[in-house]
Amino acid sequence: MGLAIIGWFLLPLGSKIALKSSFDEFHAPIWNASIKIRDLSHYWGHLSDSKNTLIEKGRDHARILSDAKLQISRKEELQNELEKIRNLKNELQMLEKSLDLSPVQTFAPLVARVTLRSLSGWSQNLIINKGSNFNLSAGNAAIFSEGVVGKLEKVNENSSKIQLLTNSSFRVVAHIKGDDRPITYRGGGVSFGSRNLGLITDVPQDVRIPLGGSLEIISSSLGGSFPKGLKIGNAYKLEPSTDGIFQTAEVILSKELNVIEEITILRK
């Protein structure tokens, strides 16, 4: 170590300057990098605590709080609306009881395929491929795209028998479209020429058929098997009943009843 110091002092001044310059040039990049790292560290440290950042964080926090309050208030509003709906439902049930009204009926539809037809002059029935294995029961309504088909007369485990609305044993409460007064519909069989027929009775005396028009006969919910408004057929001519109090009319039904392949059963 001592020799190195003595040697340094014995070196010419020019050599000392050159040697020091080389040493500085060698370390300069390291020092510059160190300074840049320190400056960068200070920058990020100050940036995280800068005024602008704090302001932005404050705004974000305010927005989060505002949204949370809005959600809380919305929840209370929805709970109030739910309570109102429950109260209205209870009031409707009480009103139905006081007026002795039947509650609104709901049905679960089930599509079935026709497997056999019995369309004689005496009886008109269909057999479908669904039965008690699909929770069907006698009295269930059978419908299709054009309206009423009939109702289930007999239910087996894997098949069911449908009594068509042309069957003379088929009877339901019905309405004239646009008139809520109940009338009676019953099957009228199949005439020569394969016309599907029905008959309506108990038609009030004030009912008239427009010139060149017809009366559309629709199903009624009063019977319990069908929803209201399904088409049954059309009546074109009214005649006085035998008692002279009401009117009767022949009803022309859809031709598609003879060739229908799929039916929808309405389960209660």
Image (cartoon, grey):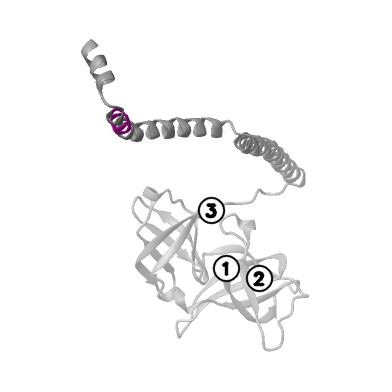
Residue 165, x across and y down, in percent: 51, 68
Residue 169 horizontal side relative to residue 242, left or right = left
In this view, 29 is above or below 215 = above
Distance Cα–Cα, label 2 vs label 1: 8 Å
Residue annotated with mark 3: 107
Which amino acid, by three-letter code, is at mark 2? Thr
The extreme top residue here reads 2
Residue 244 horizontal side relative to residue 233, left or right = right
Q: Residues within 10 Å of mark 1 (few under 14, many from 20)?
A: many
- First-in-chain label (1 vs 3): 3
Residue annotated with mark 2: 201
Do we see residue 243 in this rendering? yes
Residue 219 horizontal side relative to residue 262, left or right = right
Q: Residues within 10 Å of mark 3 (few under 14, many from 20)?
A: some
Secondary structure, mark 2, is: strand
Find out whether the residues at labels 2 and 1 contact each other: C-beta distance under 8 Å: yes
Residue 189, x across and y down, in percent: 49, 74
Residue 41, x across and y down, in percent: 46, 31
Main structural element of the magenta stretch: helix, strand or loop? helix
Which amino acid, by three-letter code, is at mark 1? Arg
